[in-house]
Amino acid sequence: MGIGTSSPSGAYTQPSLHIHATGNGSELHLTDVTTGATSSDGMSIFQYANDGYIHMRENGSLRTYVNGSERMRISSDGSCRWTPDGTSQDMTLTASGNLLSL
């Protein structure tokens, strides 16, 4: 499916959503009834020129799952938590001033 293009393409042979902008930048903006529906709500995945972004606008966490288990979480306070093997043995990276702790 294409938005802004008459010939959508993807990196894989499976169906894809191709968003093409005529200027710099394309955005996929996701919202729901909890977040609201304005430009400052929800989250976006976007591309601008040569850079890519994931922008979480809510006071929540951004979580990454692989093989059915949470592997990484970035909390609203900026701390990062990795769970390499899907168990309770996780690593958390937090910052306080100029000091990083693991």
Image (cartoon, rainbow, N blue to C red):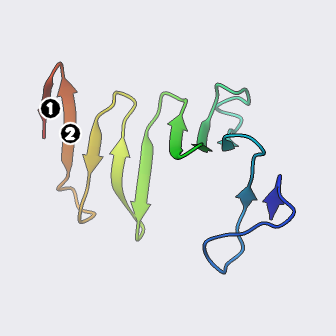
The residue shown at (25%, 56%) is 83
Check residue 67 in the rendering and tell me which mark sits there, or answer none.
none
Amino acid residing under circle 2: Leu
Q: How many marks?
A: 2
Q: Which residue is mark 1?
A: 100
| Residue 102 x %, y % | 13, 41
**Hey, which quadrant is residue 70 in on the image?**
bottom left
CA gap between label 2 and label 1 equals 7 Å
| Residue 12 x %, y % | 61, 76
Amino acid residing under circle 1: Leu
Residue at the farthest bottom position? 13
The residue shown at (73%, 30%) is 37
Q: Secondary structure at mark 1?
A: strand
The reply to whether discs 2 and 1 touch (Cβ–Cβ < 8 Å) is yes
The residue shown at (78%, 66%) is 8
Q: Which residue is mark 2?
A: 93
Lower sequence index among marks 2 and 1 = 2
| Residue 96 x %, y % | 18, 22
Residue nearest the viewer, comparing 96 with 33: 96
3 on left or right of 66: right
Q: Is residue 94 above or below residue 97?
A: below
Residue nearest the viewer, comparing 4 with 73: 4
Q: Secondary structure at mark 2?
A: strand
| Residue 47 x %, y % | 59, 45
Q: In which quadrant is the N terminus drawn?
A: bottom right
